């Protein structure tokens, strides 16, 4: 989560956030190692801890959402996480004011490590990020590492909320699209979700806008079914007959006209 300098939330700010949520609670705070269960925060103790933290310390807490725990690291006034290299931007302009962003990171708790890439955990993590984005107006963007994408706060709120409420998977943002040397349009980051990338072959990919729209539609279905292992025939929105088939190494799903 990318914040302008000086606006990263503190422990106290996170506790204010938790106090206003129905689905989020504090499950562990390193300041209070004695509490084995989710506990109410001691605001005075947290303020003292924040005041005593050295600039090089990395401060964190663990939050519980829908039965899943997530670590939030990089809280102020401790050290920010390392700013990411942004490869793609969605509703987030490359502007001098965004050149020195500070970073708060969200990751599945240690006991979720074996299932960190399962759909329930990923949905829970993105839901928590959406909750934080709604609460912290100083948030500039959310960075999604698998696609190298920085997604503007408002756009992130909108597409993730729609998905959580039963809408389409937020392909624009969580997935990137690059043009290959031979003119195909290839997804970046879909493999994180299904183990395969989507590749729309020329001449179907010649119109990049139309090809991207097609890619977004197909990705929504592929995330639902978890990829493909056999060739499938489909009909594009314009009525064109298409074939989807895996590459020889099964790492790509190729889409071409029939």
Image (cartoon, helix red, strand yellow):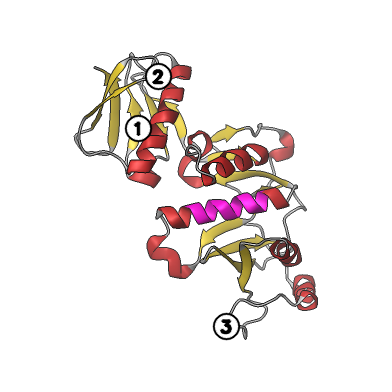
Q: Are marks 2 and 3 in contact (CB under 8 Å)?
A: no
Give the mark toward the camera: 3 or 1. 3
Residue 147: within the magenta?
A: no
Query: Which residue sits at x=29%, y=35%?
Result: 252
On the image, the x and y values in percent for residue 92 come to: 65, 34
Query: Which residue sits at x=68%, y=66%?
Result: 56
Q: Looking at the rendering, which quadrant does residue 235 occupy?
A: top left
Q: CA distance from mark 3 to mark 1?
A: 45 Å
Query: Which residue sits at x=56%, y=40%?
Result: 162
Residue 124: within the magenta?
A: yes
| Residue 237 circle label | 2
Residue 238 visible at all = yes
On the image, the x and y values in percent for residue 247 come to: 23, 33
The residue identified by callout 1 is 198
| Residue 111 circle label | none
* In the foreground, 40 or 32: 40
Q: For label 1, count other residues whose C-alpha is less than 10 Å away and answer few (under 14), some (14-19) or many (20+).
A: many
The residue identified by callout 3 is 36
Secondary structure under tag 1 reads strand
Quadrant the C terminus occupies: top left
Residue furthest to the front: 166
Residue range corresponding to the magenta coloring: 123-133
All told, the count of numbered labels is 3
| Relative height, residue 109 to residue 214 (above, below) | below
Left or right of 231 in this view: 199: right
Nearest to N terminus: mark 3 or mark 1: 3
Q: Looking at the rendering, which quadrant does residue 42 occupy?
A: bottom right
Left or right of 254 in this view: 212: right
Q: Looking at the rendering, which quadrant does residue 240 occupy?
A: top left
Secondary structure under tag 2 reads loop
Give the mark toward the camera: 1 or 2. 2
């Amino acid at each position: 989560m990318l914040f302008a300098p000086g606006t990263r939330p503190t422990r106290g700010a996170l506790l204010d956030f938790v106090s206003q949520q129905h689905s989020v609670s504090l499950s562990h705070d390193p300041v209070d190692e004695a509490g084995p269960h989710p506990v109410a925060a001691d605001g005075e103790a947290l303020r003292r801890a924040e005041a005593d933290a050295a600039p090089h310390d990395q401060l964190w807490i663990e939050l519980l959402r829908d039965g899943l725990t997530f670590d939030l690291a990089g809280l102020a006034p401790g050290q920010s996480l390392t700013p990411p290299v942004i490869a793609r931007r969605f509703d987030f302009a490359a502007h001098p004011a965004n050149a020195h962003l500070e970073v708060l990171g969200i990751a599945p708790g240690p006991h979720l490590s074996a299932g960190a890439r399962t759909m329930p955990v990923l949905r829970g993590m993105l839901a928590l990020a959406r909750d934080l984005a709604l609460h912290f107006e100083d948030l500039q963007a959310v960075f999604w590492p698998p696609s190298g994408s920085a997604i503007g706060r408002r756009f992130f709120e909108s597409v993730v909320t729609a998905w959580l409420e039963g809408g389409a998977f937020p392909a624009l943002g969580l997935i990137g699209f690059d043009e290959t040397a031979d003119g195909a349009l290839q997804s970046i980051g879909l493999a994180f979700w299904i183990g395969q990338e989507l590749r729309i072959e020329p001449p179907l990919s010649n119109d990049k806008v139309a090809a991207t729209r097609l890619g977004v539609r197909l990705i929504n279905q592929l995330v639902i079914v978890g990829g493909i292992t056999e060739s499938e025939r489909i009909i594009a929105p314009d009525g064109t007959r298409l074939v989807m088939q895996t590459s020889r190494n099964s790492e790509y799903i190729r889409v071409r006209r029939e």
